[in-house]
């Protein structure tokens, strides 16, 4: 094995790739060759590093110096200064403020507040190398489970850890595994839900791109725990790079016998197959996903029976989100007690969030559960760009609630966010500053649900359409007071009567905006005025429009 | 990716794909995706062959083919331009990118340019919200777009 005196990590996650990290990597290889350092410095392509806003990012080890917004033209100088002369290239260093320029990774505020369990290897290892995964403790947990633990002990450990489903519903993972383990059946399945469609969410994509083996290992452990021999990963058709990395990882794992027959010399056999979706948000709902995987329209089933009794192909099935599965190996390796050292009593562990919208550090972070919204937005997130005022944060993606500045100190965990009328959901965080109109964004939420409703149940099919219709009329100054009553009635009906969480959650974002930003609705309805000037139909001066009565 | 928008559909190719997947659990979706890659879209003759080959009713096959946004029962332009207009992209100015695309291509959503080059579609979320607003053309994603840069991107395909 060759030893290198320095490693240059280039982020090759989707966001950095879109900003040109491939060209940076190529230029690095060329330059190192040119200055005769190709044998001494290794360039590693990693998965997402998280700091997408500052991409493409490059980290040089052993010092851990972080360089941001690196272009191919910066590379010759970077190589000559840092790698030949041993001096940091000041102008590309990450800066929080002008005076704090010299930054290594652990010094950066963005990382200091984070606790990386799920993202332990993202941005650190080459995701296409199983050797690097193993070198970082990979497949050790699977080995421990298979050789030192009984299946029931694995389930018990998961239960004790308090891990809850990271796809949004927050159901206790250990309990789900126990139900499946106790259901009689020769054939059982483990399904990884990688149909990440919640707008604003891209964590599963980046986990799969950055550390695919972590998910495979979690699935194999789940298989052992419940007695399943086959796993499926159902993934969005749009996630080309994740699919490629997964296929490669599966091939490598089979070759080293972490998948296949007789894993770790035991009698346990397990294999994984990737199934690619074809574009339908509703397939993120577990029973719709089964329908799709079985070759039908992705329409949700009635529950019960629950998947652990009759799931995929009618067999007992454990279906877990990507992030949930990536938590499994560390829990088995370090124990439930260790895991409970992070997060809150009711929501142990960490949560991966994706930061989007009007926030300085757009990107991917992992923090202990229970951290406040304020710490995420103004600490790790770096605050609102241009010194503008915070207006609202939507937690949990488009199906989550919208929280105003007064609720910035809400602890981010399943129970506290639910109390605030919102949800932890997928971990998407959309931040808006005061230039945006609440009615306009609520109209966009409504349009989304109308488009994505599968049409199977009437309250959702008709309700999402009516909500979008009402929101459009409010945004164009054609709504009256009665419309708000209708919105409330629709919301009640849909929450109670819709078949699946899509329809049940569809009114949530709308109703929270109405609850917390009522005055903006009133301005649109009573005064025919958009306070931020966003709604185009109302862009004319308020006085002229206020004269006419709305339809 | 071979695309045939005119003339007879190569049903031999369809049969070959069906034969390769036959007996596999839940084969329909993978089969339809492969057939579409080979043919360019999912014409009725192809759907009939898939139904026959897999022993499914045509209504089930047609139902699936029309349910998913990445499956097409009508011919498409050479490149599908899929523009995201979900909330994260909207907040970052997607509406102007959408308006620019509609104006620049001279077509509405779901339509194909007369030269057969572009089909314009809306998409719910591409999962690249870190670089919003985003557009996907063919298999490639473009992020951090403005009305100016999206025109430049289109030029790459013309």
Image (cartoon, helix red, strand yellow):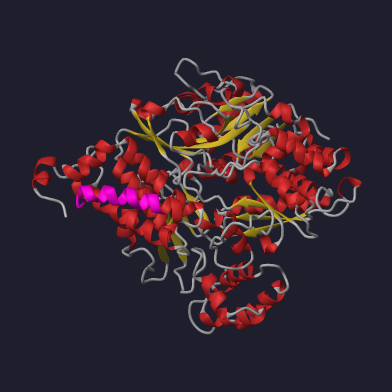
Percent position of residue A488, x then y: 33, 48
Q: Nearer the viewer, residue A20 or A222?
A: A222
Q: On the image, which quarter does residue A350 sit in? A: top right
| Above or below: residue B154 compared with residue B131 | below
Residue range (magenta): A477-493
The residue drawn where x is 21% and y is 47% is A481
**Is residue B29 toward the left or the right of residue A451 in the image?**
right
Q: Residue at x 57, y 75 (%)?
A: B61
Indicate the position of residue A431 as horizontal and vertical percent values: 41, 35
Residue B8's place in the image compared with A435, above or below, is: below
Q: How many marks?
A: 0
Q: Main secondary structure of the magenta part?
A: helix
Query: Does residue A507 appear left or right of residue A167 in this picture?
Result: left
Q: Is residue A439 left or right of residue A341?
A: left
The residue nearer to you, when weighing A429 against B77, is A429
The C terminus of chain B appears in which quarter of the rendering?
Answer: bottom left
| Quadrant assignment, res B103 | bottom left
Q: Is residue A273 magenta?
A: no
The spot of residue B134 in percent (x, y) is: 44, 49
Q: Is residue A480 magenta?
A: yes
Residue at x 76% of width, y 38% of height: A156
Residue A160 seen anywhere in this rendered image of the structure? yes
């Amino acid at each position: 094995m060759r030893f290198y005196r320095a490693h240059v990590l280039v982020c090759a996650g989707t966001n950095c790739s879109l900003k040109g990290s491939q060209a940076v990597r190529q230029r690095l290889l060329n330059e190192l060759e040119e200055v005769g350092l190709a044998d001494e410095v290794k360039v590693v392509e990693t998965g997402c590093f998280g700091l997408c806003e500052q991409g493409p990012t490059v980290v040089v080890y052993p010092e851990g110096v972080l360089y941001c917004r690196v272009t191919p033209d910066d590379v010759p100088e970077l190589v000559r200064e840092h790698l030949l002369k041993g001096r940091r290239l000041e102008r590309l260093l990450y800066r929080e403020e002008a005076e704090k320029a010299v930054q290594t990774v652990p010094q950066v505020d963005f990382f200091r507040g984070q606790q990386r369990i799920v993202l332990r290897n993202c941005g650190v290892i080459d995701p296409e190398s199983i050797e690097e995964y193993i070198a970082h403790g990979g497949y050790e947990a699977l080995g421990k489970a298979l050789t030192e633990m009984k299946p029931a002990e694995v389930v018990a450990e998961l239960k004790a850890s308090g891990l809850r489903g990271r796809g949004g519903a927050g159901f206790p993972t250990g309990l789900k595994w126990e139900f499946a383990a106790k259901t009689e059946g020769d054939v059982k399945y483990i399904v990884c839900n990688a149909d990440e469609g919640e707008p604003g969410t891209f964590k599963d994509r980046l986990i799969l791109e950055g550390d695919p083996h972590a998910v495979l290992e979690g699935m194999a452990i789940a298989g052992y725990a419940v007695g399943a021999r086959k796993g499926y990963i159902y993934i969005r058709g749009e996630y080309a790079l994740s699919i490629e990395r997964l296929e490669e990882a599966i091939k490598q794992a089979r070759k080293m016998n972490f998948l296949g027959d007789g894993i770790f010399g035991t009698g346990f056999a397990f294999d994984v197959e990737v199934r690619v979706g074809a574009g339908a948000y509703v397939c993120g709902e577990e029973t719709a996903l089964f329908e799709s995987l079985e070759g039908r329209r992705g329409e949700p089933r009635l529950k019960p029976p629950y998947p652990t009794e009759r799931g995929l192909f009618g067999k007992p099935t454990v279906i877990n989100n990507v992030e949930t599965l990536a938590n499994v190996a560390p829990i088995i390796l370090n124990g439930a007690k260790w895991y409970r050292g992070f997060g809150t009593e009711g929501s142990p562990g960490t949560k991966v969030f994706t930061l989007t919208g009007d926030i300085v550090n757009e990107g991917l972070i992992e923090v202990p559960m229970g951290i406040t919204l304020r710490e995420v937005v103004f600490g790790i997130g770096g605050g609102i760009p241009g010194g503008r005022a915070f207006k609202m944060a939507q937690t949990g993606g488009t199906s989550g609630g919208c929280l105003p500045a007064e609720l910035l100190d809400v602890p981010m965990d399943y129970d506290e966010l639910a109390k605030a009328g919102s949800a932890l959901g997928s971990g998407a965080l959309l931040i808006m500053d005061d230039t945006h109109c609440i009615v306009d964004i609520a109209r966009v939420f409504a349009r989304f649900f109308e488009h994505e409703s599968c049409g199977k149940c009437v309250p959702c099919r008709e309700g999402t359409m009516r909500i979008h219709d009402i929101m459009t009329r409010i945004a164009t100054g054609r709504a009256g007071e009665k419309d708000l009553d209708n919105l409330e009635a629709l919301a009640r009906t849909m929450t109670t009567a819709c078949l699946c969480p899509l329809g049940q959650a569809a009114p949530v974002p709308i109703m929270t905006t109405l609850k917390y930003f009522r005055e903006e609705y009133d301005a649109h309805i009573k005064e025919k005025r958009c306070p931020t000037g966003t709604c185009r139909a109302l862009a004319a001066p308020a006085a002229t429009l206020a004269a006419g009565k709305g339809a | 990716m071979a695309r045939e928008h005119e003339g007879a559909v190569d049903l031999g190719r369809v049969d070959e794909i069906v034969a390769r997947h036959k007996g596999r659990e839940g084969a329909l979706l993978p089969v339809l995706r492969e057939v579409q890659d080979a043919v360019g879209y999912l014409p009725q003759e192809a759907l009939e062959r898939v139904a026959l080959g897999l022993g499914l009713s045509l209504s089930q096959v047609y139902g699936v083919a029309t349910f998913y946004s990445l499956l097409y029962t009508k011919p498409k332009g050479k490149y599908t331009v899929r523009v995201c207009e979900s909330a994260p992209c909207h907040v970052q100015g997607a509406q102007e990118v959408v308006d620019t695309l509609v104006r620049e291509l001279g077509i509405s959503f779901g339509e194909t340019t007369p030269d057969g080059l572009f089909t314009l579609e809306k998409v719910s979320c591409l999962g690249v919200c870190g670089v919003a607003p985003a557009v996907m053309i063919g298999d490639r994603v473009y992020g951090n777009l403005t009305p100016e840069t999206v025109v430049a991107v289109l030029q790459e395909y013309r």
